[in-house]
Amino acid sequence: VARSTESLLDSFRVGDRVALSRIITMVENDHPDSAMILDALYPMTGKALRVGITGPPGAGKSTLVEQLAFQMRQSSLKVGIVAVDPTSPFSGGALLGDRVRMSRVSLDEGVFIRSMASRGSGGGVAWKTLEVCEVLDAFGTDRIIVETVGVGQSELEVADATHSTVVVLVPESGDGVQAMKAGLMEIGDIFVINKSDRESAELARMALESALELKQTDNGWRPPVVSTIALEGKGVDELFHKIEERLALLVSSGRIEMRRRECVRSKIAGILKTRILEREWRRGQLPQLIEEETTKVLRGASTPYKSAEILLGRLEAPSDR
Amino acid sequence: VARSTESLLDSFRVGDRVALSRIITMVENDHPDSAMILDALYPMTGKALRVGITGPPGAGKSTLVEQLAFQMRQSSLKVGIVAVDPTSPFSGGALLGDRVRMSRVSLDEGVFIRSMASRGSGGGVAWKTLEVCEVLDAFGTDRIIVETVGVGQSELEVADATHSTVVVLVPESGDGVQAMKAGLMEIGDIFVINKSDRESAELARMALESALELKQTDNGWRPPVVSTIALEGKGVDELFHKIEERLALLVSSGRIEMRRRECVRSKIAGILKTRILEREWRRGQLPQLIEEETTKVLRGASTPYKSAEILLGRLEAPSDR
């Protein structure tokens, strides 16, 4: 472990935001010290509750996230924001200066905004998001808002990484249908109709509510529908209270604790898998052997599965141990 | 290997579509025999060229796919269609009867339509898509069209699994910007402005073309922009010819062959990784041990990384071997 990492951790522990930012970058980039860092921070985690905000592009998620963060700050909660939405102004996806809008919360010392590079991370976005949340948790945040765009598989996985999921829709007729298609109805435990000053808002709300009546209640929780106008901050206090209500229920029912256990279990298993593969890859000098087998397959002298079995057999050989 | 699987393979080899459909389902669901099946089919693969069609929801991708398949059939090409777009009528995402539209190609004996369940497959959509493409390839298709919705990480990975990617946009002003945000500009090697009878079509086309001028040519290929009206079949022949031109270039430059080598390599490595982990998990009786370590971590007596190291150490012990 580099000495600089030790001093970085010291700065982190006394609340240095630059240290926080650097550590997140290291974790995101799989820096060699990141395992040691996460391990050192682990005992400081377990307090932050994670809320996912998802919905189709253009639903106003980022504005809502900003307003929600502001609302949480009014209750003296420290807030972390993680944007894994490639179209979010938080994640640098904005090309048209949307980022300027965020200035109100981004200048607040009690708010920590972080974007995730969701590209090229080889399907590990959910895992990385959880790790970044852990760092924010260790830093002392009370709530972490994870913003994702509600289309596609990795986004659903990220939603799995949060405790409660808010699905944001707009009144346009097709939106509810799209939401159902994309599986958003299943993952949401709070629904928002944003831009609810639009004409068809009341109709959209009724349609959504009747669709939600078909959903089974979860421990007595039936997903509420909140109408908001995020740009004007309207309805955001109600949304905040619904979120807090939901989180309180999850805590009192033991669900949060159960989730933490699952999370630790899959973390140990995940680290172990990576380490096993690293070890075997090194022992077996597999890259060269795989290259040779690839050539055999392309010549028609083997198939991928046969080649994999051959290599697995070589790893068994006691002479390699 | 079950006897039924053997006879299923026999039926597949003589062109039985029901056998094709069953085999794809087995591969999709990780049936115990799926490795053996893919292995048996492997020597029959290598002919089909894969074209990705991606773009935002509502751009008219499914209609374009249908028209394109029809066009390919006119050239006597056998066509496979794989829909991994959750909003696609092919993938059963349509709630409003869109599926009726597809009847023209779906009744054609030379077209094979398959949807992928992109949910709950644990991030392995791209891998599974490739496997389904392999099965279609072995069945004798010449072209495979993979339809994905152009938002989100897993969709970009699926695009990586094809040889050429067509990005479909509509003339609406914001669309090009969204495309840039979502990284579509980078992955496309052919662009389509669909619904080009709309007012702003010519403007959108010019904006797109000037944006594309900034892109580096790839082996002399500069991504063309094709205007289409998919509903009326207009421009689809031009799109088809551009795709064929692109594929021919990729074949002659040796790129397709290189991709096949990469694919075999990562296939061997992927299978090997899975098999190594299965073996170690069995040997080490890891599930119980992980449970014990999880409890230790939750009591504060360990951390996930320390626990993983402890378990890795146990796997080293010669008594386990």
Image (tube, coloured by chain):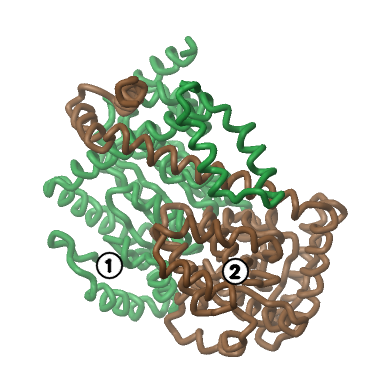
Chain colours: A green, B brown
Where in the figure is residue B210, as x and y percent of width and height? 81, 60
Give the amino acid type for the residue marked by disc 1 in the picture.
Answer: Val
Which of the pair A1/B287 is nearer the observer? Answer: B287
Q: Which mark is residue B53?
A: none
The residue labelled by disc 2 is B136
Vertical order, A315 against B110 (above or below): above
Where in the figure is residue B108, as x and y percent of width and height? 62, 87
Where in the figure is residue A153, as x and y percent of width and height? 45, 58
Residue at the spot x=59%, y=77% of the render?
B14
Q: Which mark is residue A225?
A: 1
Vertical order, B164 against A174 (above or below): above
For the N terminus of chain B, the quadrant is: bottom left
Vertical order, B254 against B60 (above or below): above
Tally the marks: 2
Which label sits in the foreground, 2 or 1?
A: 2
Based on the displayed image, in which of its 4 quarters is residue B185 positioned?
A: bottom right
